[in-house]
Amino acid sequence: MVDMRVKIGNVTLANPIMPASGCFSTDLAQVIDLNRLGALVAKTVSREFRAGNPPPRVSEVEGGMINSIGLPTKGIEYFLSLQVPDYKRFTPPLVGSISATTIEDFEAMARDVSASEIDVLEVNISCPTRDPKGGNFALHEEHTFNVMSLIRRTTDKPIWCKLSPNAGNVVARSTSTVSGPRSATSSAASRGLASSRSSCAWSISAPRR
């Protein structure tokens, strides 16, 4: 049998297959064996309940689709009390994904979520539909460095940072996240535009990197 194990920092996965955050739930256990995955990635959670963006949220385009979901979430208490135990029924490592609007809340979210049974902390500083004006941490090298440095001092859990391909110099942003030994980086969706009667920030669905 082929050995498909991969190591990301100090995290060893049975294989490199994992769902992108927000594209997966444990309900899929009804049709596939989730224990065959390399990791389970929970949907990004913020401290408070978020309804997400108003519809329309999805638009078909030639060759695919673009979406404007807006990070809906039931909040951190729901995630810690219900979702984490639900995910831990399965054997792959659990990646908990967090989002916040301030550096201070990112620090608090990292501390609170890291205290749970998650195995990896994903820091989502990049979702282009969180703020239609484009105001996210991943667009600024200094902001990326500041928030990741603070989180690195807050938790001993492995840290994966979700960057943005819309930042221009993605290499510089990536370098800002990996000055410590526990960080890895991934890429979120690219910005897109769907013509409609109302203006909205859309993002192109892209595979996890």
Image (cartoon, grey):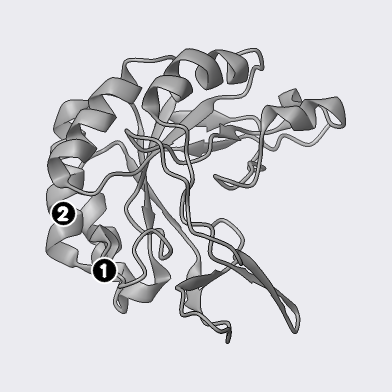
Describe residue 76's horizontal placement relative to residue 172 as left or right: right
Q: Which mark is residue 37?
A: none
Residue 116 higher or lower than 192, as above or below: above
**Side of 6 relative to 109 (left or right):** right
- Kindly identify which residue carries mark 2: 145
Give left or right: position of 158 versus 102: right
Does any portion of residue 120 appear in the rendered image?
Answer: yes
Three-letter residue code for mark 2:
Phe
Q: Which of marks 2 and 1 is nearer the N terminus?
A: 1
Q: Determine the image quadrant of residue 140.
A: bottom left
Residue type pointed to by label 1: Leu
Tell me how far mark 2 sits from mark 1, CA to CA. Answer: 11 Å
Mark sitting on residue 139: 1
- Up the image or down, 67 lies above or below 145; here it is below
Q: Is mark 1 on a helix, strand or loop?
A: helix
Q: How crowded is mark 2: few (under 14 residues within 10 Å), some or many (20 or more)?
A: some
SS of the residue at dot 2?
helix
